[in-house]
Every structure is written in structure tokens, then in C-alpha cells.
Amino acid sequence: MTEQKEPIIDRTFAEKFLRAADRPMDYGVYFLLHDWWEGAPQSALDAYAANLRAMPGADEFFAEAWLPEPLKIADLEQCAPETLGDAYRRYIVDNNLFEDFARNYRKFHQQMLDAGTFDRLPEEMRFMLVRGTQIHDFMHVITGHNSSPIGELGMAGFHFAQMKFAYHAMRFAVTAAHVAFVAPEHIESTMDAIVRGWLMGRETPNLHFAKWEEQLDRPLEDIRAEVGLTTWTQAA
């Protein structure tokens, strides 16, 4: 008789994972991520932190822990056409993303620390969760991924290739489970988006440690050429 081994994945969390896999738009990965780390194996948390520390430039990035003050739409309106700031403003306006755009991420980070929300997380994961959210829309603008569900999957592939981070790993796990057990008609479009974003991220230098808020006046196409994104056609 086969010995019954203790589960590794917390079974209370597994129920929440299945809730997200049932209807990913109703129970988002952001909520699921918070559920996961409450009972996550310490070895997994440590491994994700090690992924971040191993990236070139990580020591300086995490030592500085730079979270700038919120930008203002009025400031972006001063940016010349075809600059990063101009494209970023248009992305925010076109997608009605004013709430996230105006958030004070420095204050948000401190609130999470004070509330104990990040208590189990290594320091690198704590900071990257906040800074990664702050620059997510910059990544959309620079890579060319739109805000559709397919565009977001491609963006997740790009993030995951560059950061190997828990949020994006979980996004893939939820998406794969939903497609496998609920919506197999989306296999091709889902995999095309994820693989395209993953390959783009693998072939592009790390964009997550840059201070994009200080490069608003640079022509967007110059930035893309500098990091090799001009070889990619417009993303989905």
C-alpha cells in the first residue's frame, strides 16, 4: 500500500485557487497571491527572493528601494508627442486607469508593512510587489501590449521571463487550469500570448529596475531601439 504523504500545498488555499480557476475575472490573482503566502512553504518564498537577488543590478535596486511620488496628468501633458510621457498619458486616459495612476505607492507600501500584510515575505518580494505594480503600465507602453485579456497575458509572460516572480507564476497557473478544465477553446490564443510575451522578455534586457518616471521626455522609439524591442511587431 502506497504511503500517504503530507500535502505540500495548503488545502485551504487550494480551494481558493480553484475559485480563481473557475472564474479568473471574479477572483483575481492579486487576491490569490495574498492567500498563498499565508501558508506558503518557506522554501518557495526564499526561492522567489533568490530569483530577484540574482538579477544584475538587484543589489543597488533593492538598497535604494525607490518609490517616486505620484505623477500628474497635467505634468504628462507637457511631454512632447511620441515621447514616453506622451504615450503613457494616452494609455492611462484611454484605459481609464486614473485610480492606479494617482496612487501614492510609497504610502501604500508603508501601509502594507504597518498592517503586517507582508510579514511572511522576504524584503525583496515586499518591495517588488509594490514597485512592480507601479511600473506595470509603463511596461504596457514600452512593450506595446494593450489592456485586453490577451494583452495582459502577454504582459504577464514578459514580466515572468524577466522577474520569475510569484504573481506571474500564479497568473499562469490559474489561466492554465481555467483553459484546461473550463475553456479549452482558448488554448491557442492563450498560449500564443503567453509564449510571445515570454520570448520577448527573454530577449530584452531587464526593464524593471529602470526609473521610467525620470525618462518621460525620451522618444518612445529610442527607448525601444535601445532595448531591442524594435525587432518585435506591435503586441496584442
Image (cartoon, helix red, strand yellow):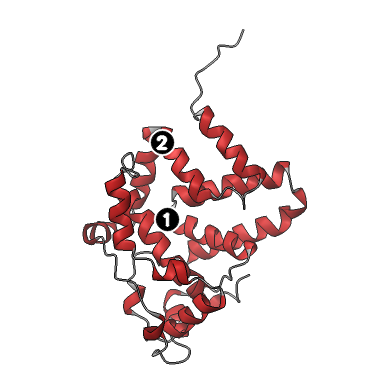
Give the mark nearer the N terminus: 2 vs 1. 2
Which mark is nearer the camera, 2 or 1? 2
Answer whether labels 2 and 1 touch (C-beta < 8 Å).
no
Out of 47 and 125, give the one closest to the viewer: 125
Which part of the image, by quadrant, shows the N terminus?
Answer: top right
Q: Secondary structure at mark 1?
A: helix
- Considering only vertical position in the picture, is 172 above or below 69? above
The answer to whether 233 appears left or right of 44 in the picture is right
The residue lying at 36 percent from left, 57 percent from top is 130
Give the percent coordinates (x, y) of residue 15. Answer: 58, 33
Categorize mark 2 by other alpha carbons within 10 Å: few (<14), some (14-19), many (20+): some
Q: Is residue 56 visible?
A: no
Q: Secondary structure at mark 2?
A: helix
Give the percent coordinates (x, y) of residue 18. Answer: 61, 38
Find the residue positioned furthest to the top: 1
- The image shows a total of numbered marks equal to 2
Q: Which mark is residue 116?
A: none
The answer to whether 212 appears left or right of 192 in the picture is left
- Considering only vertical position in the picture, is 125 above or below 97? above
Residue at numbered disc 2: 38
The residue lying at 61 percent from left, 50 percent from top is 26
**Three-letter residue code for mark 1:** Met
The residue lying at 34 percent from left, 72 percent from top is 70
Find the residue positioned furthest to the right: 185
Give the percent coordinates (x, y) of residue 25. Answer: 62, 53
**Three-letter residue code for mark 2:** Glu
Residue at numbered disc 1: 163
